[in-house]
Image (cartoon, rainbow, N blue to C red):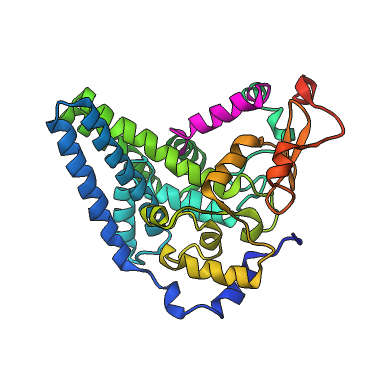
Amino acid sequence: MTEEQHLREYTKALKARLPRHFFEPVPARLAYLPVFLALFGLCTWGIVATPYVLLKLLLSLGIGYSFIGLGFLAHEILHGAVTKNPVVRSVSGTIAFLPLMVGARLWRKWHNVEHHGHTQHPEDDPDAMGALESAIQKPFVKWMFRQVPALRSFFLFFSFTFWFTLHAHMMFRRFLPDFKPAERPIVVFQAVLPVLVWLLVLFMVGPLNFLFVFVIPWLLANFIAMSFIATNHLLNPITETNDPLMNSLTVRNPRWLEWLTLGFGYHIEHHVFPALSPKYAHVVAQKIKELWPERYNELPHWKALFYLWKTPRLYRDHRNLIEPTTGHVFGTLGFGLNDSKIKQPKSSRRGLGKKGLGE
């Protein structure tokens, strides 16, 4: 892969080749909101009505799908891909993000502004992983990277069951001081509202049913969300320039599954045009492949997860990941990451071991 290009180089070339209506909101996508809410309501009614645990579990999976569908829809809405009306966007985005417990105003600051504006920047992207040098300053990270790689990967994938919501809480604490005093009450309200809603649901359905109505679906929705989010960027190189073809990855699934997940896997396309509806993402993908075939990063979703399992989450430098217990180096996407490199990783000149982690 060649050197970094700025986002505007891609947008300028692509806008000349795409229909103008692609850049307008698609209000029809808002119809997913009542559909997912109805699915939640019907499954909740079934869980409360049935005495059979297995049927409760099956209905709980249905709620899990409604939760992650709402999360993907909230992402679209709050980028302006569904409506430009600020009131409709805020209210519908707040409702859609209730299951994952994320405030709409916080999301627009954390995700739309900071993450999209500084994607994979080592200091400025709030969602980027750290470099080896910063890891040795954090006791928990040092402890984690002393564990054998397989155990560490298990911890990583297990954390997917709660990480999206936990990370949102961390972003609330990080970015709340950045809001103007007049904005902070709404940010706090949107953070507290999901807790109040789900406490009310707990009171209405009881503790056992709440396990199936919220806890299991919430764990499932977090896991599915993180299975996409982690593969969107964590296999890519660090970039000082916001180059979405270098710092992002599109993951592909069977067409029926891409439809069920609202096209969320088209992530390069999303970073090139954040406000463009996923309805048109496959066309944008085709144009990008025609113009920059050597720069485009695309993997089957399962393979991206496999790569995520087999590689460490620390950067030795902008282009390589490093396994600190052995000193093995893995390339990133576009810079040597492939099946053979994972099976037989490159060795660095020295093993790091405990000493390399600051002891």
- Among all residues in the image, which is located at the extreme left? 49
Query: How many marks on residues?
Result: 0
* Above-or-below relation of 314 to 90: above
- Residue appearing at x 74%, y 34% in the figure: 133
Q: Position of residue 154 (x, y in %)?
A: 55, 28
Asked whether residue 145 is drawn in magenta, I would say yes
Q: State whether the magenta stretch is mostly helix, strand or loop.
A: helix
Q: Position of residue 125 (x, y in %)?
A: 60, 48
* Above-or-below relation of 236 to 290: above
Residue 242 visible in the current orientation: no
For the magenta stretch, what is the residue range? 144-164
Give the side of residue 149 with respect to residue 44, left or right.
Answer: right
- For residue 130, which quarter of the picture? top right
- For residue 277, which quarter of the picture? bottom left
Quarter in which the C terminus is drawn: top right
Residue 336 visible in the current orientation: yes
Tell which of 135 and 351 is nearer to you: 351
Give the side of residue 147 with respect to residue 86, left or right.
Answer: right
Quarter in which the N terminus is drawn: bottom right
- Residue appearing at x 78%, y 31% in the figure: 327
Give the side of residue 42 with respect to residue 303, left or right.
Answer: left
* Above-or-below relation of 20 to 78: below
Q: Position of residue 54 (x, y in %)?
A: 24, 28
- For residue 161, which quarter of the picture? top left
Q: Position of residue 183 (x, y in %)?
A: 40, 50
Tell which of 238 and 264 is nearer to you: 264
Tell which of 341 and 64 is nearer to you: 341
- Residue appearing at x 49%, y 62% in the figure: 274
Asked whether residue 239 is drawn in magenta, I would say no
